[in-house]
Image (cartoon, rainbow, N blue to C red):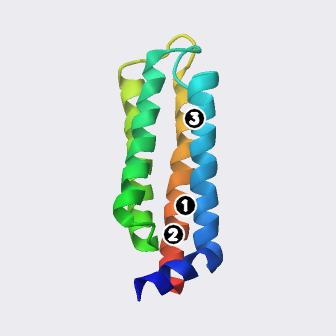
Protein backbone atom coordinates (compact mmCIF):
# COMPACT_ATOMS: atom_id res chain seq x y z
CA UNK A 1 0.00 0.00 0.00
CA UNK A 2 2.68 2.53 0.99
CA UNK A 3 4.99 1.20 -1.71
CA UNK A 4 2.54 2.36 -4.40
CA UNK A 5 2.43 5.87 -2.93
CA UNK A 6 6.21 6.18 -2.78
CA UNK A 7 6.58 5.01 -6.37
CA UNK A 8 4.10 7.67 -7.52
CA UNK A 9 5.86 10.58 -5.78
CA UNK A 10 8.64 11.13 -8.33
CA UNK A 11 6.02 11.44 -11.10
CA UNK A 12 4.53 14.46 -9.34
CA UNK A 13 6.15 17.53 -10.92
CA UNK A 14 5.69 19.62 -7.75
CA UNK A 15 7.45 16.95 -5.69
CA UNK A 16 10.35 16.71 -8.14
CA UNK A 17 10.62 20.51 -8.30
CA UNK A 18 10.66 20.72 -4.50
CA UNK A 19 13.48 18.18 -4.33
CA UNK A 20 15.43 20.07 -7.01
CA UNK A 21 15.07 23.42 -5.21
CA UNK A 22 16.04 21.95 -1.81
CA UNK A 23 19.04 20.05 -3.17
CA UNK A 24 20.16 23.00 -5.27
CA UNK A 25 20.01 25.32 -2.27
CA UNK A 26 21.89 22.78 -0.14
CA UNK A 27 24.67 22.43 -2.72
CA UNK A 28 25.05 26.20 -3.05
CA UNK A 29 25.01 26.57 0.75
CA UNK A 30 27.79 23.98 1.11
CA UNK A 31 29.81 25.58 -1.67
CA UNK A 32 29.53 29.07 -0.22
CA UNK A 33 30.19 27.93 3.34
CA UNK A 34 33.28 25.94 2.46
CA UNK A 35 34.52 27.99 -0.48
CA UNK A 36 34.25 31.68 0.20
CA UNK A 37 32.39 31.83 3.49
CA UNK A 38 29.06 33.51 4.03
CA UNK A 39 30.00 34.83 7.45
CA UNK A 40 33.33 36.60 7.48
CA UNK A 41 36.32 35.63 5.38
CA UNK A 42 37.17 32.23 3.96
CA UNK A 43 37.64 29.73 6.77
CA UNK A 44 35.71 31.65 9.43
CA UNK A 45 34.50 29.03 11.95
CA UNK A 46 31.10 30.75 12.18
CA UNK A 47 30.27 29.20 8.78
CA UNK A 48 30.06 25.80 10.48
CA UNK A 49 26.64 26.80 11.77
CA UNK A 50 25.30 26.20 8.27
CA UNK A 51 26.01 22.48 8.61
CA UNK A 52 23.50 22.53 11.45
CA UNK A 53 20.96 23.94 9.00
CA UNK A 54 21.64 21.06 6.64
CA UNK A 55 21.44 18.57 9.51
CA UNK A 56 17.95 19.84 10.32
CA UNK A 57 16.92 19.18 6.71
CA UNK A 58 18.51 15.73 6.55
CA UNK A 59 17.06 14.59 9.87
CA UNK A 60 13.67 16.01 8.89
CA UNK A 61 13.76 14.14 5.57
CA UNK A 62 14.61 10.89 7.35
CA UNK A 63 11.81 11.35 9.86
CA UNK A 64 9.38 12.28 7.07
CA UNK A 65 10.38 9.20 5.08
CA UNK A 66 10.40 11.53 2.06
CA UNK A 67 6.60 11.90 2.15
CA UNK A 68 5.41 15.29 0.87
CA UNK A 69 3.64 16.52 4.03
CA UNK A 70 6.57 15.58 6.24
CA UNK A 71 9.04 17.05 3.78
CA UNK A 72 7.11 20.32 3.84
CA UNK A 73 7.51 20.45 7.62
CA UNK A 74 11.19 19.48 7.37
CA UNK A 75 11.88 22.28 4.89
CA UNK A 76 10.05 24.83 7.04
CA UNK A 77 12.25 23.74 9.95
CA UNK A 78 15.29 24.12 7.68
CA UNK A 79 14.21 27.65 6.72
CA UNK A 80 13.75 28.51 10.41
CA UNK A 81 17.21 27.12 11.20
CA UNK A 82 18.65 29.23 8.38
CA UNK A 83 16.94 32.31 9.83
CA UNK A 84 18.31 31.46 13.28
CA UNK A 85 21.87 31.33 11.93
CA UNK A 86 21.35 34.72 10.27
CA UNK A 87 19.94 36.18 13.49
CA UNK A 88 22.86 34.83 15.53
CA UNK A 89 25.36 36.23 13.04
CA UNK A 90 23.70 39.65 13.03
CA UNK A 91 23.20 39.90 16.79
CA UNK A 92 26.72 38.69 17.61
CA UNK A 93 28.14 40.85 14.80
CA UNK A 94 29.96 37.84 13.37
CA UNK A 95 31.95 38.22 10.18
CA UNK A 96 32.73 41.90 10.50
CA UNK A 97 34.37 43.65 8.67
CA UNK A 98 34.15 41.15 5.79
CA UNK A 99 30.41 40.40 5.89
CA UNK A 100 28.19 43.37 6.58
CA UNK A 101 24.58 43.15 7.73
CA UNK A 102 23.17 43.70 4.24
CA UNK A 103 25.22 40.85 2.80
CA UNK A 104 24.18 38.50 5.60
CA UNK A 105 20.50 39.40 5.22
CA UNK A 106 20.54 39.01 1.43
CA UNK A 107 22.45 35.72 1.30
CA UNK A 108 20.55 34.13 4.16
CA UNK A 109 17.28 35.50 2.80
CA UNK A 110 17.98 33.73 -0.49
CA UNK A 111 18.38 30.39 1.28
CA UNK A 112 15.36 30.99 3.51
CA UNK A 113 13.30 31.70 0.38
CA UNK A 114 14.62 28.55 -1.33
CA UNK A 115 13.84 26.30 1.63
CA UNK A 116 10.42 27.90 2.20
CA UNK A 117 9.65 27.67 -1.53
CA UNK A 118 10.60 24.01 -1.50
CA UNK A 119 8.28 23.49 1.49
CA UNK A 120 5.46 25.16 -0.43
CA UNK A 121 6.08 22.87 -3.41
CA UNK A 122 6.06 19.81 -1.14
CA UNK A 123 2.75 20.97 0.34
CA UNK A 124 1.39 21.38 -3.18
CA UNK A 125 2.64 17.88 -4.06
CA UNK A 126 0.87 16.47 -1.00
CA UNK A 127 -2.43 17.97 -2.13
CA UNK A 128 -2.08 16.49 -5.60
CA UNK A 129 -1.04 13.02 -4.39
Q: Which mark is residue 53?
A: none
The answer to whether the residue labelled 3 contacts the one labelled 2, judged by CB atoms less than 8 Å apart, is no
Report x, y in % for residue 97: 54, 10
First along the sequence among labels 3 and 1? 3
Alpha carbons under labels 2 and 1: distance apart: 6 Å
Q: Nearer the viewer, residue 41 or 7?
A: 7
Number of other residues with Cα within 10 Å of mark 1, as a class: few under 14, some 14 to 19, many 20 or more: many
Q: Residue at x 34, y 61 (%)?
A: 63
Q: Residue at x 41, y 18 (%)?
A: 93
* Side of 26 relative to 53 (left or right): right
Q: Where is 87 relative to 70, above or below?
A: above
Quadrant in which residue 34 is drawn: top right
Q: Which mark is residue 122?
A: 2
- Screen quadrant of the N terminus: bottom left
Front label number (3 vs 2): 3
Secondary structure category for the residue under label 1: helix
The residue to which callout 1 is attached is 118
The residue to which callout 3 is attached is 30
Report x, y in % for residue 47: 48, 24
Number of other residues with Cα within 10 Å of mark 2, as a class: few under 14, some 14 to 19, many 20 or more: many
Alpha carbons under labels 3 and 2: distance apart: 22 Å
The answer to whether the residue labelled 2 contacts the one labelled 1, judged by CB atoms less than 8 Å apart, is yes
Q: Please indicate, yes or no, whether residue 106 appears anywhere in the rendered image.
A: no
Secondary structure category for the residue under label 2: helix
Q: Nearer the viewer, residue 93 or 12?
A: 12
Quadrant in which residue 54 is drawn: top left
The answer to whether the residue labelled 3 contacts the one labelled 1, judged by CB atoms less than 8 Å apart, is no
Front label number (3 vs 1): 3
Q: Residue at x 56, y 28 (%)?
A: 33
First along the sequence among labels 3 and 2? 3
Amino acid sequence: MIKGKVSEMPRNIAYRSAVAVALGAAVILIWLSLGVGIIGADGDPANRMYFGVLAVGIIGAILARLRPNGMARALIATAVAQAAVAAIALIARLGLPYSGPAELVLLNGFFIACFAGSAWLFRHAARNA
